[in-house]
Image (cartoon, rainbow, N blue to C red):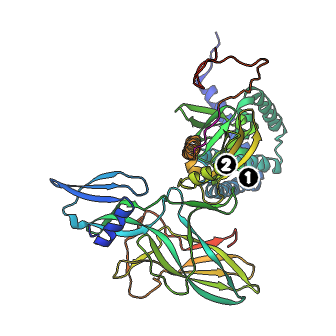
Amino acid sequence: MVSYKKGSLSSSWSLGFRVLKMDVLGWLQARWLDLLYVVIVIVVALFISALLERAIRRALIKRVSTAIVNNVVKIVRYGVLVIAIFVALASIGIDVTGALIAGGFLGIVIGFAAQASISNFISGLLLVLERPFKLGDFIRVGDTIGMVTEIGILSTTIVTWDGVRVRIPSSQLFNSDLRNFTASRVRLVSVEVQIPYSASVEKATEAVKAKLKEQWYVLEEPEPVVFAKAFANDGVVLEVRAWTPSSTWFTLYSNLPRLVKGALDEAGIQIPYPQRVVWFATPLKTEEGAKPDSPIV
Amino acid sequence: MSLTSQVASQLREHGISLSLDKSGSLIIYKREGGFPSGPVEKVINTPSLDTIRVYPVHSIQPEVSTHLLLKLSRPIVVAPNSSINIYVKMPISVGVYVFGGEAQKLVDFFGPRPYKYALYGTTSSGMVCRFYRTDVFPELPGAELWEASTRITVENSSDDFIEVKCIVFPILNTMIYIDDLGRAYVEAAHMHISKDGLGVISLENEPPLPGLRSCPQQFGKLQERVVKFFMEFGF
C-alpha cells in the first residue's frame, strides 16, 4: 500500500502551479503583441461580419423569407470568424496546418455523409440568387403544379390545385425544368375547334372573335386571333387564341371552349360529327314513300 | 342615396337597379345588373340613409390593374421643343359609399358594361392596363355619366416630331372632381417626352378646371398614390 505525506503532495502541486504560472507569464510577456494582434483581428472580423450581416439582410429581406436570410447570415458570420481565427493564428507563427488537414478530412467525411443535404443547400443558395419564383407564384416542377407557399434553403413547399402540400428539395428544383406561370403579366390560352366544310370560315372567325371581345378577362390588345389551321376529316380546324391577365388565366382557360361553342351556336354553325362518304357498288333498294332518315332496308 | 332622376333613368337604360331597404336598425343595399356582375346585396350598419352617397370612382378592378391606357382614336403629332394641351375622356364607374364620422367605405362600384384591359409593353415585362379609347378634344368636353374628362399637357423636349397614340395613366387614388351639374373630371396630368424619347406622365394634383369639388378617395389610405409613370414601351 502506497502512502503519501500530505505536506509533500501539496507542496509539489504548488510548485507545479508556480512553474506553470511563470511559464504563462513569461509567454505572455514575450508574445503579448501577438496576442493583441489576434484579439484585434477577431474584433475586426466581428465588425466586418456585422457589416456583412446588415448588408445581406437589406439585400435579401424583401426577396426571400426571413428563415433563409437568417441561415445565410449565420453562415457568413461563422465563416468570417473561422477564417479570421485561422489567419490570426497563422500570422503569429502557430502552425494551423494540422487543424486545416483535420478540418479537411472532417469536411470530406461530412460531405459524403450529407451529400444530398449539401447538394440541396448549395442549390438553395443558387436559387436565392437566381430567384426563378417568389412566394405566391404558380409553378410546375416535374408533374407537380401549385402555388409556392414557403421558400427554404433546403426545400420549397408548394400547395397543389387539390390542396396537397408538396415539399420539393432545392436540388430537384434547381436541376429540373421549372415553369413559372405567374412570372409573366399575361397568358395565352388557345383551343382548337372544327367547323363543317360547308360553313364560312370568315363568319365563324368573326363570330368567335366578337364573342371573345365581349369578355372582360380577354385582353383588347393583343386582340384575340382566330384562324383556319388545317383540313381535317370532318371539317376545317380553327385555332382560337386569346390573351388574358395572369390573374384571370383560369377564368379564360375554363370558359374558352364554352365561349367558342356559344359563338358558333349563335352563328348557326354546327361543330361537325365524324363523317364518312360511302359508295355502294349497286343501287340501294328503298321503300316507296320512305322518309329520308328512315333506316335503309 | 342621392341620385338624380336623370342618373336613375340612365342606370335603368343599362339594366341596373339600385335599392336601399331599411330593416330595423339595418339598411340593406341591393344592386342588380352592371359590371362587376350583380346581383350584389349587402347589409350596412348605419344610423340613416343619408350616410350612403354616390360618387364617381375609377373604373378599374385593382386586383387586375391600377393603370389606364388611353388609346387616342386620332394620334397627335407634337412639334419639336413645344407643348400642347389636349383634353381626353376616361371611363368612370359609380361608387356607393357609406360615411360615418371621419371614416368612409366604398360599399359597391359598378359600370354599365364589362371593363376591358390591354397589355402595355411586352408579354414578359409589360403591364396590364384598363383600356379605353378616347378622342382628342381641343377644349374640355362635357362628359356623360360613365365618363370623366381631363387635361393633359404634352411637352416634347426632343428635336423631332413625336406621334402620341396612347397615354398610360396611373389611376390608383388619382383625384376625381365633380362640378355643380354632377359631371366628373380627373386631375390634370403632364406628359413629358425627353430628348432621348422617353415619355413620363406625372399627375399635377389639381383639377382641370377651377372651382370643382373633390370626390372621396376610392381606395382610402390603404393604397399608395402613384403620381408618375415612365412610358418605357412607347407612346
Point out the image quarter for the C terminus of chain A. Answer: top right
Name the amino acid type tagged 2: Arg
Position of residue A1 measured from the top left corner of the image (x, y, whole percent): 64, 9
Instruction: Tell me which amino acid carries mark 1.
Output: Val
Q: Main secondary structure of the magenta part?
A: loop
Label 2 sits on residue: A241
As drawn, B30 above or below B9: above
Q: What is the quadrant of residue A275 in the picture?
A: top right
Q: Is residue B48 above or below residue A107?
A: below
Residues drawn in magenta: A268-272
Residue B233 falls left or right of residue B8 = right
Relative to B82, is B207 on the left or the right? Answer: left
Q: Measured from the top left, where is residue B145 in percent x and y? A: 40, 72
| Residue appearing at x 32%, y 72% in the figure | B6
Q: Between residue B174 and residue B144, name the one nearer to us.
A: B144
Q: Secondary structure at mark 1?
A: helix
In the rendered image, which residue does mark 1 sit on?
A: A38
Question: Percent from the top left, x then y, of residue A264?
Answer: 59, 44
Mark 2: few/some/many CA within 10 Å (<14, 14-19, 20+): some
In the rendered image, the residue lying farthest to the front is A288
**SS category of the residue bearing label 2:** strand
Q: Does residue B74 appear in this view?
A: yes
Q: Quadrant of residue A213?
A: bottom right
Please state the chain letter of the residue tagged with numbered disc 2 in the rendered image: A
Residue B55 higher or lower than A282, as above or below: below
Task: Tell me where residue B87 sits by quadrant.
Answer: bottom right
